[in-house]
Amino acid sequence: KPTNKVVQRLQDSMLNKHNFRMLIATYYPLLAVLIGVLLVSLPMGPYETLDTQLEYNTTRGVLRWGYPFLDRFGEASNQSYGDLFNMPPLGFYTQAASFTVFGVSLQNGVFLVTLFGVGSAVMVYLLGKEQYGKTTGLFAAALFALAPWQLILTRAFLIDVQCLFLSLIYLYVGLLAI
């Protein structure tokens, strides 16, 4: 049975109106940058190349076979596998999970990649803040998030942004461990 101290700690840690206001007051510059990035990147629409089609079809292969095999646009037979795609498979599995929840479409996949791009900007902020302070973290996040190549990658169905996000998390955890 929980004690009063445990209940009090849970109530203190929950996001209530006061904690929410403090969170907004502390991180409003970062939130402004992230909202600006979304306002700039979302109207760009999905960016498509041969690589985006290959990775889209490989994600369909994960849904079909359970492995990142390149689905050759819906072969008639389920007996033959496609070609193994030589990329880190975690990105295809996260995209396949997204497709399972939201439906199989290029726009749904690009939306998930955009969320990873926003997460990458947050990680750049945290890295800059940890090493040099809040102002530097905010400036680094703004420069990173509004860089043309980052905007293009966050609007393309590629696993590169997911890999970058995870790499930034590993870097941040490594810096905290030092």
Image (cartoon, rainbow, N blue to C red):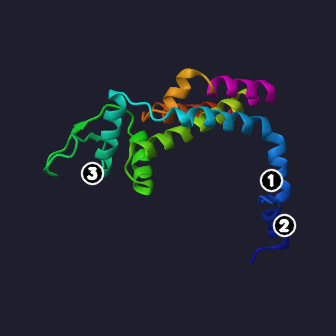
Number of other residues with Cα within 10 Å of mark 2, as a class: few under 14, some 14 to 19, many 20 or more? few
Closest to the observer: 5 or 34? 34
The percent position of residue 82, horizontal first and vertical second, equals: 20, 40
The percent position of residue 141, horizontal first and vertical second, equals: 68, 28
Q: Measuring 32% from the left and 51% from the top, which residue is drawn there?
A: 63
The percent position of residue 9, horizontal first and vertical second, equals: 82, 63
SS for dot 3 = helix
> With 6 as the anchor, is 144 left or right in this view?
left
Task: State the quadrant of the N terminus.
Answer: bottom right
Which residues are the magenta region?
129-145
Residue corresponding to mark 1: 20
Mark 2 residue type: Gln
> Which is nearer the N-term, disc 1 or disc 3?
1
Residue corresponding to mark 3: 64
SS for dot 1 = helix
> Which is nearer the N-term, disc 1 or disc 2?
2
Choose top left, top right, bottom left or bottom right for residue 34. Answer: top right
Residue 145 visible, this orientation: yes
Number of other residues with Cα within 10 Å of mark 1, as a class: few under 14, some 14 to 19, many 20 or more? few
The percent position of residue 65, horizontal first and vertical second, equals: 26, 50
